[in-house]
Image (spheres, rainbow, N blue to C red):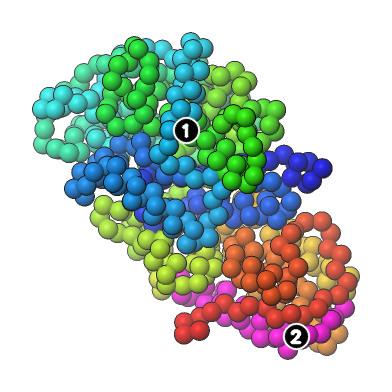
Amino acid sequence: MTAGQRHGRIAVVSPAPTANGDLHLGHLAGPFLAADVFTRHQRAAGREAVLGTGAQDTSTFVVTTARRLGTEPEHLVADSTARIEATLTALGIAVDGFSRDEERFTKLVLDFHGRLHAAGKLELKPVRFPYRPSTGEYLVDGFVKGGCPVCLTEGCAGLCESCGHPLAAGDLIDPRSTEDPQEELELRELPVLVLPLEQYRERLREYFERTGAALRPHMAQAVREMLAAPLPDFPVTYPGAWGIPAQFPEVPGQVINPNAETMAWSMYTTALGAERRGEVLQADDQLWWPEAGTEVVYFLGFDNTFPFAVAGVAMLMALEGRYALPARFVTNEFYELDHQKFSTSRGHLVWGQELADRLPRDVGRYHLAATSPEYQRTNFGWEQLAAVTGARLVAPWNRIVEKDAALAGRTLPVSAASRRAADRITARFAAAYGSEGFSLNRAAETLAEQLGRLDRWEATERQAGDFAHQVRTVLRCAAPVLVDLAAEAVAGGALDSLAVGGPDTTTEVTVRPLPRIPVGGD
Ligand SMILES: [Zn+2]
């Protein structure tokens, strides 16, 4: 039995970004880098882990963006999907399962909702929508904007980016069509299939009592607010021409609400990832069956709380024990550029590719980790990046490499005190990487502190082995963030593996040269 089997598989899921553009640093500094670092650490600690994401093509924002750009939605999806995948690769986000517009996914979504429908869990109810008399369209999500009735912030229907509450199009304050804000809208009722969430409120409350201790405060607050009052009906189908056509006779011409795809999509991306790692599955949702023993951990933007953690978990509950429930949700807030929110439509952003092109990606990853918006909005700036990474990472590391190079070729003894220090270093990093208190910020701080210590250490001849030993311990612990540096150190024989955990038993170290971090002009 391997360690992976002993602890069960871990499925790391980060919601697929909308296929209406490339990824900018706001996406990367939020869920994706965190999911990647977490997954890499789990594997280094001996656990089988699968990372899944993708590109979501069913969102109405694909249609609204295509209109703005004067292109066809299908072209935008194809182009954006390729870019998203390329950017993740460029930044070293090692995704196992990457979902895209595929028949197999559509089938899984329809099977999932078919099961809810067959079990009598969905109800046909009249729901109010803003209606455009000029086109005969009922407006949902990206097609309509207005004020949020909970927090009064202006935004599109669906989900409120600000307070995280679901935002029914018919409840918007002063709704306007995003295509023609001048047009006078009507409110009309239309029967759609809903999941009556209120029936699951008590079970959701128990679920969050059990699992919610590690939630970050903003999500904890939003969940508390939502569960303090009766929950709304959650539309599983709604009117529209873009999306997966619902196949229920009572709602002709409707599509599956993209925000109701969350759980079927999560299962799909987990399955793709496991297959890519060599598993053979009998069913696409198999890894989510309770007997599979998979621990599901989400890394997601705060505004995805409702569709994944509330409506999504309620959908799983409605299927009565067929599926295990997610173990953990790790949220992030917005990342800002020059103290304003990233905005694709206003061109106020830095693309992920630009970061990868301008710097060694380890340096970019370190900076995003150091400034990741874990608890509140944080800011990106190129000058700040140069200052932070120069002083805390590049300069100290390259000085350490130089000191270490003076020992090259020698085999040196490692003391018991150094083994104890190595165990403490490993434990500090593990505390930052573990799912309970996961924090990229703290991982970056821990690394800066350890590099500072090693940089200042004037090792005597007697301590030379201890110095070389601890430098290698720190690099092994930093490997989930500094992916290229660690890989180069393994390839060059400076590190024998990236595995962490278990008491350190090193008694001697043979010093082989460590890689430098290239700086401008290198
Ligand atoms: Zn709101």
Q: Using the rendered view, name the quadrant where residue 442 is placed.
A: bottom right
Q: Hey, what amino acid is under mark 1? A: Arg
Expressed as whole percent of the image width and height from the top left, the position of residue 66 reads 24, 45
Q: Hey, what amino acid is under mark 2? A: Ala
- Towards the viewer: 447 or 325: 325
Q: Mark 1 points at which residue?
A: 104
Can residue 397 be spotted in the picture? yes
Can you say whether 351 is above or below 62 in the image?
Answer: below
- Towards the viewer: 174 or 354: 354
- Towards the viewer: 403 or 59: 59
Within 10 angstroms of label 2, few (less than 14), some, or many (20 or more) residues? some
Is residue 245 within the magenta segment? Answer: no
State yes or no: Cβ of the residue under disc 2 lies below 8 Å from any atom of ligand 1. no
Expressed as whole percent of the image width and height from the top left, the position of residue 360 reads 50, 72
The answer to whether marks 1 and 2 mark residues whose Cβ atoms lie closer than 8 Å is: no
Residue mark closest to the camera, 1 vs 2: 1
Q: What stretch is highlighted in magenta?
A: 385-414
Determine whether the residue tagged by mark 2 lies in a helix, strand or loop: loop
Is residue 402 within the magenta segment? Answer: yes
Q: Name the residue under label 2.
A: 408
CA separation in Å, label 1 and label 2: 54 Å
